[in-house]
Image (cartoon, rainbow, N blue to C red):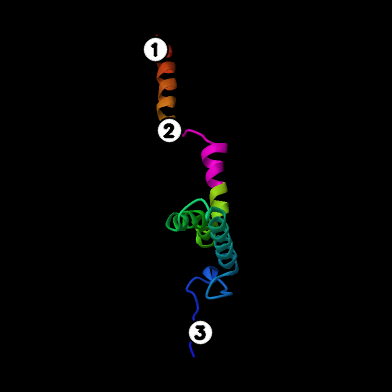
Amino acid sequence: MEVRINKEVRNYQESLFFGLSLRQLIFALLAVAVAVGVYFGLRSVLATAEIGWVCVLCAFPFALGGFFQYNGMTLERFLLAYIRTEFIYPHRLVFQSDNLYAKLMERSSMKEALKID
């Protein structure tokens, strides 16, 4: 009998069903529900091949939501952070050097020039 332990304990995810976590299972079921809804909604409008592609395209964002992780953030936290940084709080970073030594030398040379004259 062998017990598998992650090298990093914080990366542990409890598997609930077929090796999926609860979050992944919920998003997978949501993706299936969206695909079925799109199929029955567009069945009378499009051909079967086109409906299949539309179902995949509509279900993909929901399936992605369960499995996406970037720097420890879930998809909704990542999108919120992206919207905040790009649209809500946009700022342009401009580099301006601050040479304290040059400023001190300017002031000291001016004082010395005034003393000499």
Q: Is residue 32 above or below residue 84?
A: below
Nearer the observer, 70 or 45:
45
Quarter that holds the C terminus: top left
From the image, tell me which residue sits under label 2: 95
User: Please, what is the three-letter code of the amino acid marked with disc 3?
Assistant: Val
* Dot 3 crowding, Cα within 10 Å, few <14, some 14–19, many 20+: few
The one of 64 and 117 positioned closer to us in this rendering: 64
Q: Which residues are magenta?
A: 81-93
Residue at image location 55% in from the left, 71% down from the top: 13
Q: Amino acid at mark 2?
A: Phe
Mark earlier in primary sequence (1, 3):
3
> Dot 2: few (<14), some (14–19), or many (≥20) neighbours within 10 Å?
few
Label 1 – label 2 distance at C-alpha: 37 Å
Q: Position of residue 101 (x, y in %)?
A: 41, 30
Question: Residue 78, image x and y in percent?
Answer: 53, 51
In the picture of the structure, the residue carrying the numbered disc 1 is 116
Q: CA distance from mark 3 to mark 2?
A: 53 Å
- First of labels 3, 2 by sequence position: 3
Query: Which residue, as the protein is rendered here, is positioned at the far top?
Result: 117
Q: Give the label, 1 or 3, closer to the camera.
A: 3
Tell me which residue sits at (49%, 91%) in the image.
1
